[in-house]
Image (spheres, rainbow, N blue to C red):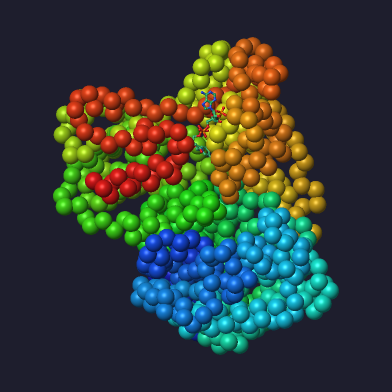
Amino acid sequence: MLGDPAPAGCFARMSPYPHLFRPLDLGFMTLPNRIVMGSMHTRLETLDRPLERVTRFYVERARGGASLIITGGFSPNEEGLMEPDAPIFNSPGQIAEHRHVTDAVRAAGGRIALQILHAGRYAKIDGAVGPSTIASPINPNAPRRMSEADILRTIADYAATAALAREAGYDGVEIMGSEGYLINEFTAPRANDRSDAWGGSLENRLRLPTEIMRAVRRRVGRDFLVVFRVSSIDLVEGGLTAEEIVAEARAVEAAGADIINQGIGWHEARVPTIAQKVPRAAWAFAARRLKEAVRIPVIASNRINTPEVAEAVLARGDADLISMARPMLADPEFANKARDGRGDEINVCIACNQACLDLIFSKRTASCLVNPRAGREIEFDAPPPPRRKRVGVVGAGPAGVACAIAAAERGHAVTLYEAQARIGGQLNLARNVPGKEEFDATLAYWRRRIEVLGIDLRLGHKPDAKALAAQGFDEVIVATGVMPRVPDIDGIGHGKCASYVEVLDGSFQVGAVVAVLGAGGIGFDIAEYLTSAPQEIAASEEHFRSEWGVDAGVAARGGLAPSPRKRGEGNPQRRVVMLQRKPGRMGRGLGVSTGWVLRILLAKREVTQVSGAAYRRIDDAGVHVTVGGEERVIPADTVVICAGQEPERSLYDALVTLGTKAHLIGGAEHAAELDAMRAIDQGTRLAYAL
Ligand code: NAP
Ligand code: SF4
């Protein structure tokens, strides 16, 4: 294989991540390291000044040291559009604007490849096409069955877009052949019921990827990078078997691919592939299967978010490169920091999806919960402040810490007060929920930034208004957070009642039969926490595969285990009932890309949900409710109160009384629908305005 072995230069010897920083010689191009910024649709093109935004977004990642950037998907033709305003690259008239991006990335020392993505039956447009008329369960539009002429024209369209990409200055293209899009649909019996040359036998089903790869290679020549993304495990019934996956990888290699990138799961799969519930590097086993099948380099993907994890995947020989999409939103300088031995200064992607995928799926533009600058780079171009101010921030939860760090980065002298013995506020509770231990990385990053920036951190300090006023700060920021709401229910003081705080911090002994009052994000988290295996087990790959019915051997089609866990196998030792006053389905406010994961998990664990409940009282028997006019008792040894929060504003009110001007942010300002995304964004933006 080209590029192996290739430890080059003294740097490879010095790096704490020697495999990650070994250059890869592809013959016509050398990648300086093994870090690829994976493709991610950002929808930045839908905002004002789109070209400026997109260019800046990629330039910052190129400067940050990613060896190769792969753009979000561009359709090769109108039928392949994901939605009516999705990106398309099918005309020479578009070359100039692409040049703007590619020239800037090259000037920043980077390389960039254009992803070509035909959405197939996932297209949310009139006139979607596919190998058959079989509709996807996640798109009500049934596709039109492509004729032979349609197929040949589409192959030519892929090649034409690749040629345009070359003319526009891209270093290569990635052909999106996975995740259930058009090419993947042709390869799998699930969506392909054809009996002509494009369906039926494996050879026929692999004809489309192979012919696209050949046509693209013919048009772009040998010295232009072509990455082919192969589905390494489909995770749907009627998907490919391991032998078929291997055959596809070999077929696209033979047809001229330079690199194979790993795709995982169709979008309609009911197995999470990138959510927090997925252990880090959980899919590396599937990358390894591809690597063992071919001689060209293979990229591993999904839930690889730190240099340590990436290095381990490469060191084990599971893959040759690592794709990171979300981690590059979280920290554009990921690669440079890792290279320079500053891994502890990386702002780690915590796989929450809240500010990236969830925003995209709700037709907004991607950003990042831990890095609100992502995708908004041009909004944070404020010139340095005219003078260095003395800034006092009270409260080291997400809003306060984000504000303190951003203010210090802008040159202000910051003092950060925290009543507790540690920073992080509610994140210290959330981190106890299985999967949410990823918040540890954010907390560690914040601690390091506070140290590096020289912020004066006063833990265990709860200054009162007078003491603060006496400090003479130029700016005072109050980020004192929230208090759990105590609902006015008869018997709320019963010894069996606990707040979610007492449960998550381990100070309350929870019984075997539990009623959870309130079904917002925290109610769901509590139900998950109480029915889950211990965090260290839940984080293991074996447990994940067993819980979700994933067969690593991909013996059966799609890699779904023949007998996935049955309902009720989750945590038989604890019975949980969730209650809310609103009628209707619970969990409507959960994240679009993650809520379904929680709902499936809780259903498997037989967590019962009661909506439209009027709480009457809590006593030894449990929770007395009226539901649909009928009186019921929900038996419970423990009643966990997850009824939202109230702002903690006593300090702010006292400052106002004293006449001291202060800014109020985070949950202290607005407790309803508080989440870390809003808190961090608000804190950061305030710091830029000081
Ligand atoms: P929340 O989402 O506002 O939910 C509060 C729950 O308490 C609701 O189910 C509400 O339902 C109930 N409630 C409100 N007032 C009540 C009262 N007086 N008596 C009894 N029940 C009452 O708040 P949260 O669950 O505390 O979450 C806080 C924030 O963190 C939210 O923005 C949430 O989205 C976010 N978060 C998200 C996730 C996630 O997406 N996985 C996880 C954790 C936290 P009824 O009024 O219908 O009873
Ligand atoms: Fe990662 Fe969450 Fe940021 Fe998305 S929003 S990039 S998942 S940290």
Q: Looking at the picture, how far across and down is residue 587, in whole percent?
A: 60, 38
Q: Is residue 107 visible?
A: yes
Q: Nearer the viewer, residue 318 or 135?
A: 135
Q: Is residue 36 left or right of residue 407?
A: right
Name the one closer to the observer, 152 or 48. 48
- Residue 478: image location, x then y, percent: 30, 34
Q: Is residue 70 above or below residue 327?
A: below
Q: Residue 50's spot in the image, x, y percent?
A: 41, 65
> Which image quarter holds the N terminus?
bottom right
Residue in front for this viewpoint, 555 or 110? 110
Question: Which quadrant of the figure has residue 607?
Answer: top right
Q: Residue at coordinates 47% horizontally, 71% vertically from top-left? A: 68
Nearer the observer, 187 or 490: 490
Q: Is residue 307 left or right of residue 553?
A: left
- Which residue shows up at 59% across the image and 40% down it? 588
Instruction: Where is residue 513? Give x, y as percent.
Output: 67, 23
